[in-house]
Structures are given as C-alpha cells and as structure tokens.
Amino acid sequence: MPLSKSEANRPIVVTPGDPAGIGPDISISVAASDSHSSDCIFVCDPSVLADRAQTLSTECTIHVMTSITDRLQGALNVWPVTCAHRITPGVITAHSAPYVLACLEAAFDLCEGGNASAWVTGPVNKAAFNEAGIAFSGHTEWIAARAGISRVVMMLAAGSFRVALVTTHLPLHAVPAAITDESFETTLRITDQSLRSLFKSKSPRLGICGLNPHAGESGYLGREEIEVLGPVIEKLRGEGMDLSNPLPADTLLTPQRIADYDAISRCITIKDYRYSSTPGLARPSTSRLDYPSFELRLITALQQILQAPVSLQTKASAARFKWLRNSANPLAH
C-alpha cells in the first residue's frame, strides 16, 4: 500500500550512522543509483559524505538544505549536522558518538514534528557510544526512551516476511529472565495491532518461535515454552488472536511455514551476517564489493517505505514503528 498523499509530500529521513562506518558509503551509492533520492533527507555532516565520495571516486551532487522543502532533484539532500573531528574510514572512535547522537536527535525532531514520513537508520557502533560515556544499546531502545514509551517491539521486515522480537540487544545469558508473561503478552498484542493498522491484515496469524532448542522438547530442554509462552498463548487465543504453539525456529523459519503466517514472534534478537569483520566498519579501499548486503538493505528499506504507510508523526509511532536495516529474504541466500 503506497504512502498517503500527505505522507508522499514529506521526505524519508536517513541517518547514515557512524561517520567512520559503512553508512556514508551506502548513502552515496544509493543516492547515485536510486531514482527516489530526492525523496530522502540525509541527516549528517555534508563534509563526511563529500570526503567519502572522493575516497570512493564517486561523483555525486551534495545539496545542503536550508529548509525542509529545500530539496534538489538528483542530489544528495543533506540536513546538516556538524561533525567536529576528523574521520578516518574504518576507524571507530568514541569522539564520534556525540555527533551521531546529534544526528539521531535531529532526525527524531523531524519525524516527531510531522516533517518526515519515515526514518531509515544506518549502522552505529554501540561500543563507541558507551566508551564516550553515553549509555546506548540500540536505535530501538533510544527512540523509545526519547519518545517516553516504556514498551516497544522491533519488527524486521522483508516484503511479507516479518519477524517481531520479544527481546533486543541483550547478552544471551540475560534473555530467559527477560521473557516474562508481561513482556511476551505485550509483544504479541503490539504485533497483532500493528499488523492490523499498518499492514491492513484483518485477521493476523502469528507463528511463535520457542526459546529453547526444539522448543523445549516437552520441558526436557527448558520449561519456558510450558511455563511462560504457553499460558500467554492460551489467554490470547481466548480473546480471538490466531497464534501457533511454540515451535522450533528451524521448523518455523522455512518458506512453507513463513507463508502460513503474517509475522513470526521470536524470543531472541536475530543478527544477520555482515561482509565486514566488525559491524559498521567501512572498507573504502575495495569500494562496494565489501557491502552488497548493506546496500541492498537500505535500498529495500526505502522501497518498502514508499510502498507502506509508515508514519512517525506521533511519539507512540515514532517509538514503535521504525524501519531498521531491512534485509533481503535470508532464505534466498
């Protein structure tokens, strides 16, 4: 479903992420190749993009905006945020964290003020934030806190393949304790509501991934499926929600099973494989060959936003519905 007429007149905000990372490379590449570049605003320091374009030997026109409507067709339209220190591609430093945070603040303000139709985020280095003394575990959690929303759900989407996460950005040993009756029930309710309101699903079907191997194997490999997930599923089924039993991930995440559901609920954050050895690091010496999957994610995100009614005008939607590094269907790889 396309953006509404009012949303179509508002740009898509893109924060490239860490200035030493892969985000500036992808932004330049997408802007150079994507016919929808004028639909986007890149919130960053224009000099970071200019320097990276020179490093990549890529020609692009960078237009520094003076107002929200000041967009140039065929150019990389930049909402300027100053980066105060010199950037070395591929070298992550804590000095960049305040700049990256300023970009996020500017993008959030644009969305909350109704000046943007959606927000696409590039990769950031969480260690750099924390080494700078800024507590940061991820975009999702930061936006939720910034919007004053206590409970949010991250959904990864690639076309009709959608995965909603019960936990995000936690050490593996902390995951079981984070899966409670309340957190699991809230995740399912928000996911069901979002499938109805955003994706126009009249009767959403949710597939549930178990936490333990083989979904606990009747309690012999863990009891969370029996003691936590099962009772919540039965409660919500009683209210009319269409939910599967907890199933092993390798059973549920298959093409045939995925086609049976509008979304999959998963207890553990899914992390995809990256072409660079460290998440977010750029390798400009080899140009685009090192990040086809990253470039595809951003292109996919922009395409999906142009096709789906994702609005970040209100605090609630700004916190709950954010398109994050959408990937191509992993089952195709």
Image (spheres, rainbow, N blue to C red):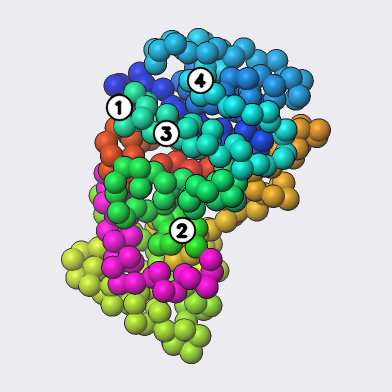
Q: Which residue is mark 2?
A: 168
Residue ID at (44%, 66%): 267
* Residue 185 placement, left or right of 297: left
Q: Position of residue 227 (x, y in %)?
A: 34, 82
Spatial CA span between label 4 and label 2 = 30 Å
Q: Which residue is mark 3?
A: 105
The residue under label 4 is which amino acid type?
Answer: Pro
* Magenta residues (range): 171-197
Spatial CA span between label 4 and label 3 = 12 Å
Instruction: Give SS at disc 1.
Output: loop
Within 10 angstroms of label 2, few (less than 14), some, or many (20 or more) residues?
Answer: some
Instruction: Choose the circle earlier in sequence order: 4 or 2.
Output: 4
Image-quadrant location for residue 265: bottom left
Residue ID at (63%, 24%): 48
Q: Which residue is mark 1?
A: 113
The residue under label 1 is which amino acid type?
Answer: Gly
* Residue 314 placement, left or right of 217: left
Residue 4 visible, this orientation: no
Within 10 angstroms of label 4, few (less than 14), some, or many (20 or more) residues?
Answer: some
Spatial CA span between label 3 and label 2 = 21 Å
The residue under label 2 is which amino acid type?
Answer: Thr
Q: Which residue is mark 4?
A: 80
Instruction: Choose the circle earlier in sequence order: 1 or 3.
Output: 3
